Amino acid sequence: MSWIIWLIVAAVLGAAELMTTTLALGIIAVGAVVAAVVGAFHLSVPVQLIAFVVASAAGLGFVRPVAMRHIKHPPLLRTGVAALVGRSAIVTEEVTGYSGRIRIGGEEWSSRAYDETVVIPVGHRVDVVQIEGATALVFPRE
């Protein structure tokens, strides 16, 4: 009969995990399921508690850190215009705070100076700071 209580505890912890998304309550819920399985074999309540504590501690100590590392992993590859930010370019038409043209790799882009007071002459190297629509905001390379 105690296994039913453990399953109720697991369900409550699982529902709470859905609200918090920290993985901690979900892992403790798995510990409650382990205790329910132990209880289904009619083992004593102290044995069920030990199974709950061991399973929860193992999950929190070993599984959660690995899972959190995988969840918080940044994307390995930037694509589209996001891949252009940080790249170097060459000015092909004078760049001001309002207009200009640059060459990023083999592509010609419209551009503006990131700092509107800066004028960047033809031939200078710039760094792409941001992309706004089809316009690259650039800053002169030091």
Image: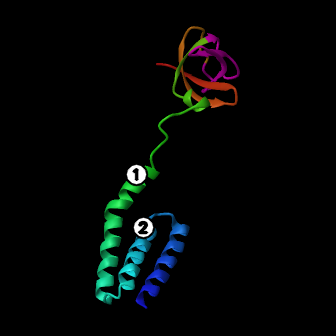
Q: Residue at x 56, y 8 (%)?
A: 123
In the image, residue 140 above or below residue 38: above
| Location of residue 59 by image quarter | bottom left
Q: Which residue is mark 1?
A: 69
| Location of residue 98 by image quarter | top right
Query: Hey, what amino acid is under mark 1?
Result: Arg
Q: Secondary structure at mark 2?
A: helix
Write down the region rendered in magenta: 92-118
Q: Which mark is residue 24?
A: 2
Q: Residue at x 35, y 71 (%)?
A: 56
* Type of colouring: rainbow
Query: Hey, what amino acid is under mark 2?
Result: Ala
Figure label count: 2
**121 within the magenta span:** no
Does 26 sit left or right of 89 as displayed?
Answer: left
Residues tagged 1 and 2 counted as in contact (Cβ below 8 A) = no
Q: Earlier in the sequence, mark 1 or mark 2?
A: 2
